[in-house]
Image: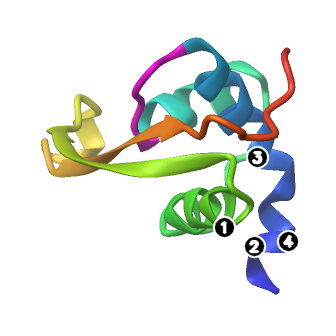
Amino acid sequence: MKNDRLHYLEKAVDYVANRMNYFGIDEVRLAAECKGLEQPPSSSDWSRLLRGCIAKNKIQMTNEYRKSNLKESNGIARMVYKKTKRGGVEND
């Protein structure tokens, strides 16, 4: 399964979900960079990572979108996520 190769990046999702009520893919990317985690080979892998975390019931999508602040994203609106109430997220 493709998502299995991204399991090491779940640390970044866990980190962000434990510290923010609502977050987007940009915050996860920045957390991964700050933690020194290797970037995935494809930029679409970030979406795969978040879908995998949704499937594991760690996070859930909201009905909100917000513009990205990252320069390379051209201000594209992105989904906002939040931690699930029973999400199995560890403290870092």
Q: Nearer the viewer, mark 4 or mark 1?
A: 1
Q: Nearer the viewer, mark 2 or mark 1?
A: 1
Magenta highlight on residue 76: no
Near mark 3 (Cα within 10 A), the count class, few <14, some 14-19 or many ≥20, is: many
Task: Locate residue 54: give its quadrant.
Answer: bottom right
Contact between marks 2 and 1 (CB within 8 A): the answer is yes
Near mark 2 (Cα within 10 A), the count class, few <14, some 14-19 or many ≥20, is: some
Q: CA distance from mark 2 to mark 4?
A: 4 Å
Name the foreground residue: 55 vs 26: 55
Contact between marks 3 and 1 (CB within 8 A): the answer is no
Q: Is residue 23 above or below residue 47?
A: above
SS label for mark 2: helix
Q: Is residue 38 above or below residue 2?
A: above
Q: Nearer the viewer, mark 3 or mark 1?
A: 1
In the rendered image, residue 68, in percent from the top left (x then y), is placed at 23, 37
Q: CA distance from mark 4 to mark 1?
A: 12 Å
Q: CA distance from mark 3 to mark 1?
A: 15 Å
Q: CA distance from mark 3 to mark 2?
A: 10 Å
Residue at 86% over, 27% down? 90
Residue 9's disc number: 3
Q: Which residues are magenta?
A: 20-25
Q: Which residue is mark 2?
A: 3
Please report whichever mark, 3 or 4, sits nearer to the chain's N-terminal start: 4
Question: As shown in the figure, which amino acid type bears the numbered disc 1?
Answer: Ala
Q: Which residue is mark 1?
A: 55
What is the residue that sits farthest to the front in this orientation?
Answer: 85
Residue 63's disc number: none
Residue 4's disc number: 4
Image quadrant holding the C terminus, namely top right
SS assignment for the magenta stretch, majority: loop
Please report whichever mark, 4 or 1, sits nearer to the chain's N-terminal start: 4
Please report whichever mark, 2 or 1, sits nearer to the chain's N-terminal start: 2
